Image (spheres, helix red, strand yellow):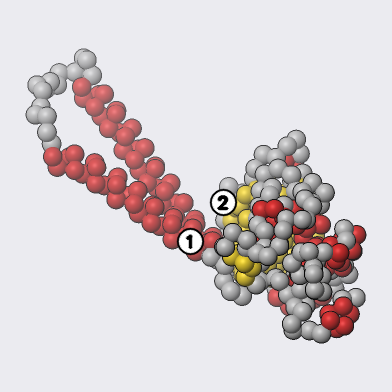
Amino acid sequence: MNDGFRLHPEQASEIAASVDALYFFQVGVTVFFTVLIFVLIWTFALKYGRARKADRILPPHEFWATELIWAIVPFAIVMIMFGWSAVIFVRGSQTPPNAITIDVIGKQWMWRIYHPEGKREINTLHVPVGQPVRLRMISDDVIHSFYIPAFRAKMDVLPGRHTFMSFTATKPGEYHLFCAEYCGTQHSFMRGRIVVMEPGVFADWIRGSTDEPPEVAGKQLFEQFRCNNCHHNNPGARCPPLGGIYGTTVALQDGTTVTADESYLRESILNPAAHIVAGYKNEMPLYLGQLGEEDVLQLIAYIKTLPSPDATPRSEAENSKP
Ligand code: CUA
């Protein structure tokens, strides 16, 4: 709940309890050794202080048992911490196949959220309880960090490249959202809330959206920048046709291949020279600096709707979008 500051935020995601268990184990180990070291310091100080009459005859140099214990025990403890945290890290970074992907754009100083159904939000993210969610995040300016303490989830949001974060909310309610990377004068105001809803309520909420789907704005941009002049399906096209390209494997000029996902399409829009498609020349202008991340997101949404030329007759393909 959003009820002010809490030292220990409630556990509201699938991974939260295991992160806490590891955290408390590490705190326990730290406290134990801190206390042990203090006790030993005071014990020896009192026992061997200058004024004390203690046995000061030099002991033999080698205590193999002691040396082995203080090498092996800390090593074992550190390896337990390493293995344990690696398991949690791998679990937390895996995305279940049924996850929904929501786009996040960080911008000084707000979070813009784009649901796949077209619904848009600012500084608030609604998600259904029990549903794996993957956030595909990018920044329009500097480094931000998307942090949901109740989910024990935090990931940097970088300019120029997508980062991902997955979670499954387990408890309906409202939770804090923070930017956890100092990003300018209003960094401390770059915060919001996560609203976890029952699936039925969420479905009604998303269905009630009147926001324009991103592909509509994407189509306008596509026409405004005359992408069609080169990217068309007719013979002699100067640039690769885009219909049905999303998710396919693209052969590149240098003999390698790449999957046409969001990151590849984004790079090809902003910096086409980075990966030239086999059989084409680098003739496309650079759109870096001309298009913001929101424009790119809308263009990609539109490109995804373009039907494959083999699958659909042309007339139908042209009429498929409003
Ligand atoms: Cu964005 Cu701090």
Which of 94 and 294 lies nearest the eye of the viewer?
A: 294
Q: Which residue is mark 1?
A: 90
Type of amino acid under label 1: Val
Q: Residues within 10 Å of mark 2 (few under 14, many from 20)?
A: few
Which picture quadrant has residue 97? bottom right
Q: Quadrant of the N terminus?
A: bottom right
In the rendered structure, the answer to whether residue 56 lies left or right of residue 127 reads: left
Helix, strand or loop at mark 2: loop
Q: Residue at image x 37%, y 46%?
A: 29
Q: Position of residue 270 (x, y in %)?
A: 75, 53
Q: Residue at image x 26%, y 24%?
A: 45
Which of 250 and 262 lies nearest the eye of the viewer?
A: 250
Residue 109 visible somewhere in the drawing: no
Q: CA distance from mark 1 to mark 2?
A: 24 Å
Q: Residue at image x 57%, y 67%?
A: 95
Label 1 CB less than 8 angstroms from ligand 1 = no
Q: Position of residue 42 (x, y in %)?
A: 29, 28
Residues at circles 1 and 2 in contact by the CB criterion of under 8 Å: no
Q: Position of residue 258 (x, y in %)?
A: 61, 64
In the rendered structure, the answer to whether residue 96 lies left or right of residue 220 reads: left
Q: Residue furthest front?
A: 236
Q: Residue at image x 38%, y 52%?
A: 81
In the rendered structure, the answer to whether residue 249 lies left or right of residue 239 reads: left
Type of amino acid under label 2: His
Q: Residues within 10 Å of mark 1 (few under 14, many from 20)?
A: few
Q: Position of residue 10 (x, y in %)?
A: 59, 57
Q: Which residue is mark 2?
A: 8
Question: Looking at the image, is mark 1 or mark 2 earlier in the sequence?
Answer: 2
Question: Disc number at residue 11?
Answer: none
